[in-house]
Structure formats: C-alpha cells, structure tokens
Image (spheres, grey):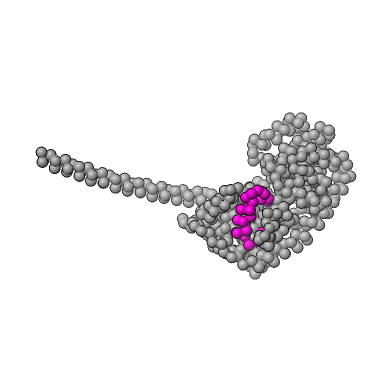
Amino acid sequence: MSEGKKLMLFSHVCNTRSITGAEKLLLFLARKLSLHFTCTIVAPQEGKLTKLAQESGIQTILLETPMLYIMCAPNENLSREAQRLKSDPATACVVQLLERERPDYVFVNTSVNVIPAMAAKSLGIPVIWHITEIIRDNPHTASAVAIIDRYSDWIVGISETAVAPFRENPVEYKVSLLYPSWGADDFRPALWSDLRNSKRKEWGIKADAKVIGYISSFLIVEKGADHFIESVAKLGKLNPGLRFVVIGGEVDRVYYQSLKRRVIDSGRSSQFIFIDYEEDIEGAYCAMDIVVIPSLLSEGFGMTAMEAMIFGKPVVAYASGGLREILQFTGNEQYLVPTGDKEGLTAKISELLVSPETSDHVGLENQRRVEAMFGSEAYETRLLSILGHIFSLSGNPVPMEEMLYTPPIDIVPVPDDQQSPQGAPILGRRRRRRKLRRRASLRKRSRVISARKRTGRKIKRKSRRIARGRKRVRRSASRRR
C-alpha cells in the first residue's frame, strides 16, 4: 500500500443477478490496486459487484448518480447535458461524499459516469478515467473527448480501439493502455474435465456431442443473438447431433420472444438450449466446443473472447471494435468475420466442425497466446507503468459554475445496526432520496401555497378598499342631489 493513500472507484452499474464485463474489469482492477491503495467501490445499489468486492475485503458505498449515456453516441445536445449535470443534486451529493471520505484519487469507470469526475475535479482530487467502451465516431466525438479531457488527470483504455478518439494532441500525453486480464484464482484447470461432464449432464447434452455456444450478460439486439441463431441453425440441418447453447438474461421481452420464434421457425428447436442466467460460468465454457461472438456493437475489448481462449476454445467473431484486436493479437484473423455477415459466421464455424484436429489445435494455441498477450505478467508490467503516472498526479481543480449545494443531502455514515446485509453503508438509497425529494417538494409546494394565500389576501383587501371608496363617492353624490 502506498503510504495509506485512498482510492475511490465509481461504478456506473451494479447488477443483481449477473455481472457485466465493465463490472468485472472494475472489480479485477480494484483487487489489484488494493495492494497499493485503500480501495473503496462506490456503486448505485447492492448487487454481484458489491458482494464480490466485500468478499475480497474491499469497502463498498451505495450512491446512485445519473449517467450521461450520450457520451457513447455524442450529439449536439452533449455539452448542454453535461453542463446541466453540474447543477444536479446528485453532483452535490458526490461532492459531500468526497469531502467526507477525502480520497487521494478518484477512479471513474466508463465514459458515461461523468458526475464523479466533475465532483472530484471541483475539489482538486486527481481523476483517473477508465474507458471500457467505444465512443462512436461522428461530428460530435470531439465534444465527448473534451469533457473527459477536462475532468481527468489520466485516461486508461482497455484497447487501442477504445482510446483511438484520444490519440490526438493535447490529450494523448495522458493516455495509457491496460488490457484486461485474469487472476490465478479465477479458474480451476484441474477441474475442467469434471466441470465439462457435469455441466453437460445438467444441460441434457451427450458427452460426445459438439456444442456451439453464445454467451452474453443480457440478450439485446446489439449483441447479435439473432445472428447466432440464424447462422448455427443452418448447420443444425446438416448435422442433427449439434447442440447450440444461448446464455443471456432477458431484458427486452419482444426481442427475446423473437429469438424463440426464430428457433421454432428454423425447425431445430430440439437442438437449442436457452439459459437465462448461468451461475457456473466456468462450467459453461468447459461444456462448449466453439464460442461464437456475433456482436453488432463496436466492443471496447471482448471479455467473452478472452475468457473462451483461456479455456482453450476456438472463437469465431464479428470484427467489431476490440474483438478485432484480441483475435488479431492471438493469431485468429482467419476467424474474424465482417460485422453482420451471418453467412461468414456459418462458414467459419463449419470449417472448425469439419476438422476436429484443426479445432483442437486452434484451442490449444489460443490458450498459449492469450496467456502471453494478456496474462498476469503482461498485465502487471502495464499496471506498474500506469501507477508511476498516478503517483505523480497533482490534481489541479476545475471549478463548476453554478453548482447547487442546497438543500444538503445527508450522507453521514449509519450506525452498525443499520448496515445492509453485506455490510455496505446504506447511503444514497432510492428510498431515502425519494423521501428527501418528497419533503423538498412538499416544502416548495407549501411555500407556493402560502405565497398564493398571501397574494389572495392582499387582493381581497385591495378590492375591499376600492369597494369602500366607490360607496363613499356614491353617498357623496347622493347628498349633493
């Protein structure tokens, strides 16, 4: 640990059932950095991320903040929306948290998590901004880059594709690459054979069947599950012994039902298995023979591809963003397919199925090359270089004009007997914020009603005075007659 320095890491999400690639990367990095800092992860709610962090001895704090999602796909409204966040009550809440915790550094995960960076820079706390996704290239990309540049002291990207928008002066001087990796305790090679057999038995798949797999945290259009189904269903007609496993949570019911209809329409329903959530992801990879990643989204890296290679599996993928990088670095260029080319996917998978020897050789080479390129030794070398930059950061303050600090939001630590089940402070909970907003709204409404009443009383008094004056005029005129 570096002289007890404190590092606060902000996550933009914390899913309850599964964990996304961005969350995995943050947790892995927090574990590594906890050897050099006292680390705290700030997440919007309790979930898999906070649970695993606490099991690793990393403190967690719950605090939800709005995301600026158009950072990934910038448009003409970006600068205005970023400016609006400065006066958002959540920004004041983060400022108060930072003033209380006094971290030496703030680590912001993903480009959409803007508020923690703004809050930290307003206090002069050095900000390390972790770019895990692709910022779309369009006429407004420079605006997104400018925001990240203004509110960061160092930028860490997970691939060349992810940091490409920052590779121009004057931003490039503070950009580093840190490819994802994995820990020695994350996987258990000695158990892989048993895990393969047990998982196949659980799925109802024979030991000698060929299994082609698709894995995603969630089944969304951008991840291309429909492309996977269409591509492998053609192979299923030629080889009824093949089995196809689709792993991913349902978030869009219409899209999910469309996937099921595609399977039914293909006439290969008996060959497909849908799994909403897989707790034993290690067993899932072991049970597969080929992993297909037909992502239509320009990926920041491609965690699924890396993980499949760790297990010695051949990977066929669309050349989308970072997926192109990882397959090129591991000598798998021939298994890259132009994004959207479903016929190409079918052809590449078929090549591996026709020659089991080739498939086995590719898998073993993947295992060797992924270790050399992204294993612990390569990761530690890159991380130490980045730490050298972090320790030299001074954190020049960037003031936020017109930031609202009232009404103040209570983020005082709660007593131990009111801690959450996992031990995280119940901080910034939705219920508490809703209550605070309701109170503020009631106070505002009360002030408005009171003002209206006062105005009404004034109008009534004035009306009475006018009426009395008119009566006096009429009486005076009557006497004169």
Q: Residue at x 69, y 55 (%)?
A: 163
Quadrant position of the N terminus in the picture: bottom right
Residue found farthest to the bottom = 3
Residue found farthest to the front = 139
Q: Residue at x 67, y 37 (%)?
A: 256
Q: Residue at x 44, y 48 (%)?
A: 441
Residue 9, position as x, y percentages in the image = 63, 58
Quick check: is 347 in the magenta stretch? Answer: no
Q: Residue at x 41, y 50 (%)?
A: 443
Q: Nearer the viewer, residue 128 or 102?
A: 128
Where residue 153 sits, quadrant-wise, is: bottom right
Q: Residue 284: tell me if it is visible.
A: no
Q: Is residue 294 above or below residue 91?
A: above
Q: How many marks?
A: 0
Magenta residue span: 133-157
Quick check: is 139 in the magenta stretch? Answer: yes
Quadrant position of the C terminus in the picture: top left
Q: Indicate left or right for 247 with 419 as reference.
A: right
Residue 242, position as x, y percentages in the image = 81, 37
Q: Is residue 31 above or below residue 235?
A: below
Q: Residue 342: tell me if it is visible.
A: yes
Q: Nearer the viewer, residue 207 or 20?
A: 20
Q: Indicate left or right for 19 with 371 as reference.
A: left
Residue 247, position as x, y percentages in the image = 72, 42
Q: Nearer the viewer, residue 404 or 378?
A: 404
Residue 386, position as x, y percentages in the image = 70, 63
